[in-house]
Amino acid sequence: MKIFFFICLVFTSQIAFSQSVWQSKSSGWLLISPDQRKECFALNENLKNYLNKARNELTSTKEVLSLAKAKGFKEFTEPSQVKPGAKLWINNRDRAVALVVVGSNPIVAGSRVIAAHHDSPRIDIKARPLYDASGYAMLQTIIYGGIKKYQWANVPLMIIGRVDTKDGKTIEVAIGDDADEPVLIIPDAAPHVDAPLRNRTYTGVFDGEELDPIIGSIPQAKGNIANQIMAILTEQFGISEEDFVSAELNLVPATSPRDVGLDKGLTAAYGQDDRLCSFVAVNSILELSGQPTFTSIAYLTDNEETGSINNTGAQSSFLSGLYGRLTEAQLDAKYNDNETRKALHNAHVISADVNDGISPLFPSLSEPSNAARLGFGVAIKRYGRSFDANSEFTALIRKILDDNSIPWQTASYKVESGGGGTIGGFMSKEDMEVIDIGIPILSMHSTYEISSKVDVWNLSRFFTAFYVSGK
Ligand SMILES: [Zn+2]
């Protein structure tokens, strides 16, 4: 009886006088000092500069390698390079990249990996793209990743990518990235004439085959406009029409990152999913001071938005191959494959990817008590599609966050609202200890995604703390 009374007292007093721990969490903006705020804005300027150059996995790899070389990282070519404190880069076919800082402990004893993907949803150009329609030259396209098709109409688009020719040349293509260069546009129908289209559904405002941009319009006395456009491409890049077959050409927004809001607390940019986490993972490893106890790796992968399938995607054996090379370099004659497996088993991995934040316009699409809010810090993703970290690794991550006073929250989808996966499951399959972590963004997978600057700063603090975690 007494015990019952005591429990009732505690229970009712909690209801009456305190709010839940989750309700009492503050926005990250309320937790930073004026100096930290300056640091936060400076970091986001660097993020914007990177996003302005890194428009796809190819340009991201190039930018990451140039940042790494400027910080003294060297290409990993020889086992003798694997010494404590060594800073190494490994370029996987110009589309995936790893940066390694070798720790004082052998890699078999443990390592710290932050893995992100630096491809983003976009529109790709087909192998036989050029055609004439109603007095225009147009491009046939195909969708890459999960886009909302209507968002890509009337947006200035650049062409970016590479063409590989039979004689072994690689031609880099970038049309529309400078303000004085032309852009391509997918033209929508005017409201004056679109009555026959008005009953289209939300997902079918455009059909996939209607996402073709205009690439030319000046008629010729002889031949069609598409042929004339091909002549311009041949003159500018030295390519022939069949070269499109061995090309990877992407249409991406030709917009630059911008601040959002009069207080400049948010950043809008194309491709923040997931070049935001990619940049922060890279920046944190580049800025590591001293020699970490455990080997730190930033690993950027390609093809996530289409299933991580290719040899540059997270399902490839590139990462386990790299572990093999690092382990063999450290063990020399004592090396065997089981040691690589042990190194993978002892690795701690952050699968870093952005989450969907609660929208001010569509809050009902989130279950508010378990969804992430912009500004409220690093988000531990629970119950993502097909992969979830175990509870003991999650507890260890909570400790790193709390020990470093980093604001954090959780992110879970509203049941039966949709969902999305990450690359975490592919590394978990390699027997690594993996958790999904990111920060929330708005307008995810759109042509202009929105992030909170204070979240980017807190993510960076967490990544640094994670790389040097453990004794
Ligand atoms: Zn992503």
Image (spheres, rainbow, N blue to C red):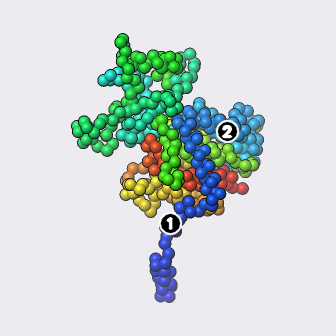
The amino acid sitting under disc 1 is: Trp
Going 56% across and 33% down the picture, which residue do you hit? 58
Direction bottom: furthest residue? 2
**Residue 283 location, x and y as percent?**
64, 45
Where 241 sits versus 264, above or below? Answer: above
Mark 1 lies on residue: 22
**Residue 401 location, x and y as percent?**
61, 59
Q: Quadrant of residue 96?
A: top right
Going 42% across and 54% down the picture, which residue do you hit? 359
Where 207 sits versus 103, above or below? Answer: above
Q: Quadrant of residue 366?
A: bottom left
In the foreground, 160 or 156? 156
Residue 388 visible in rendering: no
Mark 1 residue crowding within 10 angstroms, few (<14) / some (14–19) / many (20+):
few
Going 49% across and 78% down the picture, which residue do you hit? 17
Direction top: furthest residue? 222
From the Cβ of disc 1, is ligand 1 less than 8 Å away? no
Where 111 sits versus 301, above or below? Answer: below
Number of the label disc, if any, that sits on residue 230 = none
Mark 2 residue crowding within 10 angstroms, few (<14) / some (14–19) / many (20+):
many
Residue 179 visible in rendering: yes
Contact between marks 2 and 1 (CB within 8 A): the answer is: no
Q: Quadrant of residue 126?
A: top left
**Residue 360 location, x and y as percent?**
41, 56
Mark 2 lies on residue: 68
Q: Viewed as shown, does residue 20 lie left or right of 112?
A: left
**Residue 269 location, x and y as percent?**
50, 43
Where 410 sits versus 233, above or below? Answer: below
Earlier-in-chain disc, 2 versus 1: 1
